Image (cartoon, rainbow, N blue to C red):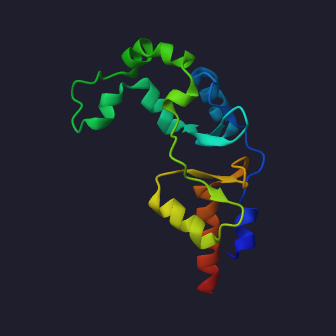
C-alpha cells in the first residue's frame, strides 16, 4: 500500500455535523451516513471534533458512569435512562463531541495512518487540508481491509 493508496481509501462524500447542531438531529445523520461517527465543524467549516456512537452513548449516561468500575446500581433497562435523558436531544453536539484532534493530512503516509489508528481509539480519521477543512474520512475498516489485502499478497 503506497501513500497514493491511502488517498484511495478516503471517503470524500461524508456529511459534516455543525458544532451547534442538536444531538437529536446529529445522531440521526450519523445513523443515515452508515458510519460510526462524523466530523464536527465550526462556522468556518474547520474540524473541531468527532461525534458518533460513543459520544451519543456518553450523552445518554451521566458523566460519572464512565469513571466507575462497578455499575450494579444502573437500571437493568435502558428505558429509564432514555426517559431521564430525553432532553439531551436538544443539547449542542459541541457539548458531547470528542474534541481531541485525531486527524490526518492529505500527505500522510500509510504508516502514519496505521500509527494513528493503533494509538487512538477511533473508528475514522478525518482527512483535513492545510486550513483544517475536512476533505473526507478514512474508516478503520477500509484501512484494515487494504492492509490485510497487502499482507496476504506478500505471502503468495
Q: Residue 100: where, in percent of width, then height? A: 50, 46
71 to the left or right of 125: left
Q: How far from the left and from the top, in percent, is residue 8?
A: 76, 64
Is residue 115 shown to the viewer in this render?
A: yes
| Residue drawn at 66 percent across, 40 percent down | 34
- For the C terminus, which image quadrant? bottom right
Quarter of image, res 64: top left
How many marks the image carries: the answer is 0
Residue nearer the viewer, 16 or 80: 16
| Left or right: residue 130 compared with residue 101 | right
Q: Residue furthest bottom?
A: 156
Residue 124: image x %, image y %?
A: 59, 51
* Quadrant location of the N terminus in the rendered image: bottom right
What is the quadrant of residue 155 in the picture? bottom right
Q: Is residue 28 above or below residue 150?
A: above
User: Which sits in the foreground, 125 or 29?
Assistant: 125
Residue 29 lies, in percent from the top left, at 67, 30
Residue 148 visible from this viewpoint: no
| Residue name at image x 65 percent, y 71 percent | 109
Looking at the image, which residue is at 70% across and 73% down? 3
86 above or below 136? above
Amino acid at each position: 500500500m503506497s501513500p497514493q493508496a491511502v488517498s484511495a481509501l478516503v471517503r470524500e462524500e461524508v456529511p459534516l455535523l455543525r458544532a451547534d447542531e442538536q444531538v437529536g438531529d446529529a445522531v440521526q445523520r450519523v445513523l443515515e451516513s452508515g458510519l460510526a461517527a462524523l466530523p464536527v465543524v465550526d462556522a468556518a467549516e474547520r474540524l473541531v471534533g468527532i461525534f458518533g456512537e460513543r459520544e451519543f452513548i456518553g450523552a445518554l449516561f451521566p458523566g460519572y458512569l464512565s469513571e466507575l468500575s462497578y455499575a450494579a446500581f444502573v437500571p437493568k433497562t435502558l428505558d429509564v435512562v432514555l426517559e431521564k435523558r430525553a432532553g439531551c436531544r436538544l443539547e449542542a453536539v459541541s457539548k458531547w463531541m470528542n474534541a481531541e484532534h485525531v486527524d490526518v493530512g492529505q500527505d500522510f503516509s500509510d504508516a502514519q495512518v496505521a500509527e494513528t489508528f493503533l494509538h487512538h481509539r477511533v473508528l475514522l480519521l478525518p482527512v483535513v487540508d492545510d486550513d483544517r477543512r475536512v476533505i473526507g474520512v478514512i474508516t478503520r475498516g477500509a484501512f484494515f481491509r487494504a492492509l490485510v489485502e497487502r499482507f496476504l499478497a506478500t505471502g503468495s
